[in-house]
Image (spheres, rainbow, N blue to C red):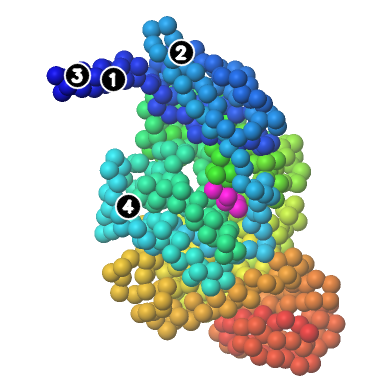
């Protein structure tokens, strides 16, 4: 009898759960914090026919429910909460009710902020950034190589597939990165990309609030940020406001037709970035640029939809507050609605005044790149709030100069256009990145030219960024395939025959470049003249390029000779800065110069001289 009674009770409670089934599937953002500048939030609630429920908020000091918005799709509600300065951390009780169903109570957490989170120090010219493609750097946790429910499985033999690198692999090698002289890590996107194939790159987000389980978890990413901070290093998160992945959960059940930019037939962006400034551009061309899709698998998000705009801003603030990242690299910065991007940037900088964001504007004309930097007075009246941009024009000029057997003119002329930028010292400078050929390949595998490129990037104005593997001469000869450009870092997998972390199996040339980078960037790490100093450069002659960094009476002289032969330069040519003969020490060779009137530099080499 007891058995029958127990069975009936179990059946009763099971059926009760079914009858009172909670329709709420998602709530985003999953929580908020007290004492935030951004204290009026729009919470997205998703679930079957959720719009048919009445929503109330139990009394909670300092918090009020301002509005409840329904949209075309009854599976969505947008609830606006006002969290005043009086509010204390706790659990808000949201009640969902309707006549034919039990009341559902949803506890929404508002938490205390981490101490001093508001004052996060963003990356700046004192930093040097190490860029990592997480899937290709190191596999620190083999248990997450494949995850149930995620479409793409591990296939290290597929150059465009998942290889198993993860957050744990990056954590394992923080000291390696630090010992090379780098003070910040920029990771390509780490959020979930549950796409059928070619998803390792991370730019097709399918969940904006979830680290891809093949990389780890939200908690493991936060732990990485904490551990990096303990080591004096910063973490820069790659974000995308322009598009999502086609497999994103909301694409399967859109809140409204205008949640993304729809077209009658598939329309790709025209990439015509000049339309932003062009006084003669048509509305049609502008629309195609801003609203066209990147590729068929990446729907273009409509930031003119107010709830979409709120969602993206809140998501960014949530990740900063939750994880403690020190910066953002915003992908395809000009492609979303540009007025939204200003609102987004303002919201971030208001909440975190010392933060930094670098925007990707891949175009080779500084007239266009400079348009996006804060402080630029633009002809069309647009004023940007973005502190930093990627200096693609200088990268291109540097490669052209190094491959030109006759002249440094390309890089000299490009740098001379810095008057276009409100803040040249806040530009991110780089020899290559994840979207272009490896710098060693761009320089035709000339190791000495690579040293010149690295020296230039380390000593010129701006914030240097180096792509993982540059230190061990990673290359992509004969192909532009991104899967090859983003090859696995040797030693990141347990069965690798070469281990770049330990140096085991590296060639003499690879060890030479690795040591060169470590010496150069560890010296740069503590050099205020390079971080903050003024810059003056001299017109180039005989394949020798000379520039100085200086603060008051402290000076550094950089001499770059890309000729095959040794060159002798007369110090009188640089009298304007030197005020006499040269006395100082080359930090690369440790060679001292005492009151010299001329200087001989060997072929294809650099001198970085701390003047005395």
**Magenta-drawn segment:** 323-328
Compared with 117, 291 (above or below) is above
Which residue, given by chain and number where applicable, does mark 1 sit on? 13
Position in image of residue 612 (x %, y %): 78, 85
Q: Pick the residue in front: 360 or 178.
A: 178
For marks 4 and 3, give the one nearer the viewer.
3
3D distance between C-alphas at marks 1 and 2: 20 Å
Badge 2 crowding class, 10 Å Cα cut-off, few under 14, some 14 to 19, many 20 or more, is some
Apparent side of residue 549 relative to residue 2 in the rendered image (left or right): right
Q: Residue at x 61, y 83 (%)?
A: 588
**Which residue is identified by label 2?**
97
Label 2 vs 4, first from the N-terminus: 2
- x, y percentage for residue 151? 29, 42
State the separation of the CA atoms marked 3 and 1. 13 Å
Q: Quadrant of the N terminus?
A: top left
* Mark 2 secondary-structure assignment: strand
Mark nearer the N terminus (2 vs 3): 3
Q: Is residue 145 above or below residue 17?
A: below
In primary-sequence order, the first of circles 1 and 2 is 1
| Residue bearing the label numbered 3 | 5
Q: Nearer the viewer, mark 2 or mark 4?
A: 2
- Distance, label 2 to label 4, CA atoms, is 40 Å
């Amino acid at each position: 009898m007891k058995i029958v009674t127990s069975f009936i009770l179990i059946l009763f409670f099971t059926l009760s759960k079914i009858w009172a089934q909670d329709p709420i599937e998602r709530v985003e953002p999953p929580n908020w914090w007290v004492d935030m500048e951004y204290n009026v939030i729009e919470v997205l609630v998703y679930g079957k026919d959720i719009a048919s429920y009445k929503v109330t908020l139990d009394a909670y000091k300092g918090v009020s429910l301002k509005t409840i918005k329904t949209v075309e799709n009854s599976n969505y509600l947008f609830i606006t909460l006002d969290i005043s300065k009086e509010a204390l951390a706790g659990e808000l009780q949201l009640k969902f009710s309707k006549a034919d169903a039990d009341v559902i109570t949803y506890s929404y957490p508002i938490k205390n902020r981490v101490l001093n989170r508001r004052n996060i120090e963003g990356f700046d010219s004192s930093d040097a950034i190490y860029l990592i493609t997480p899937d290709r750097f190191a596999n620190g946790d083999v248990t997450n190589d494949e995850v149930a429910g995620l479409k793409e499985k591990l296939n290290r033999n597929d150059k465009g597939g998942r290889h198993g690198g993860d957050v744990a692999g990056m954590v394992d090698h923080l000291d390696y990165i630090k010992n090379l002289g780098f003070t910040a890590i920029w990771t390509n996107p780490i959020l979930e990309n549950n796409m059928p194939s070619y998803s390792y790159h991370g730019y097709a987000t399918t969940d904006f609030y979830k680290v891809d389980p093949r990389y780890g978890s939200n908690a493991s990413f936060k732990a990485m940020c904490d551990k990096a901070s303990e080591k004096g290093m910063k973490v820069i998160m790659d974000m995308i406001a322009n598009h999502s992945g086609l497999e994103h959960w909301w694409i399967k059940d859109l809140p409204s037709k205008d949640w993304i930019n729809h077209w009658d037939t598939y329309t790709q962006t025209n990439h015509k970035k000049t339309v932003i400034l062009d006084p003669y551009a048509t509305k049609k061309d502008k629309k195609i640029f801003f609203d066209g899709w990147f590729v068929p698998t990446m729907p273009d998000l409509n930031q003119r939809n107010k709830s979409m705009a709120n969602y993206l801003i809140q998501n960014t603030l949530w990740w900063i507050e939750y994880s403690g990242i020190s910066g953002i690299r915003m992908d395809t910065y000009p492609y979303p609605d540009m007025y939204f991007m200003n609102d987004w940037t303002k919201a971030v900088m208001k909440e975190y005044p010392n933060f930094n964001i670098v925007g990707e504007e891949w175009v080779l004309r500084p007239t266009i790149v400079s348009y996006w930097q804060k402080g630029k007075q633009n002809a069309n009246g647009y004023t940007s709030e973005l502190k930093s941009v990627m200096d693609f024009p200088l990268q291109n000029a540097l490669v052209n100069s190094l491959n030109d057997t006759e002249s440094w003119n390309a890089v000299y002329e490009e740098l001379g256009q810095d008057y276009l930028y409100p803040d040249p010292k806040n530009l991110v400078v780089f020899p290559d990145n994840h979207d272009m050929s490896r710098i060693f390949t761009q320089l035709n595998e000339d190791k000495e030219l690579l040293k010149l490129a690295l020296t230039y990037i380390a000593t010129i104005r701006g914030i240097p960024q180096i792509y993982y593997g540059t230190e061990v001469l990673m290359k992509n000869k004969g192909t532009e395939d991104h899967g090859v450009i983003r090859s696995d870092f040797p030693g990141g997998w347990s069965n690798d025959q070469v281990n770049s972390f330990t140096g085991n199996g590296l060639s003499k040339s690879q060890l030479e470049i690795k040591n060169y980078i470590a010496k150069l960037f560890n010296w740069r790490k503590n050099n205020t003249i390079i971080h903050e100093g003024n810059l003056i450069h001299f017109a180039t002659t005989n394949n020798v390029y000379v520039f100085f960094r200086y603060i008051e009476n402290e000076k550094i002289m950089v001499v770059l000779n890309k000729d095959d032969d040794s060159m002798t330069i007369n110090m009188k040519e640089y009298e304007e800065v030197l005020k006499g003969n040269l006395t100082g020490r080359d930090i690369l060779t440790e060679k001292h110069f005492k009151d010299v009137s001329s200087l001989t530099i060997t072929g294809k080499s650099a001198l970085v001289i701390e003047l005395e």
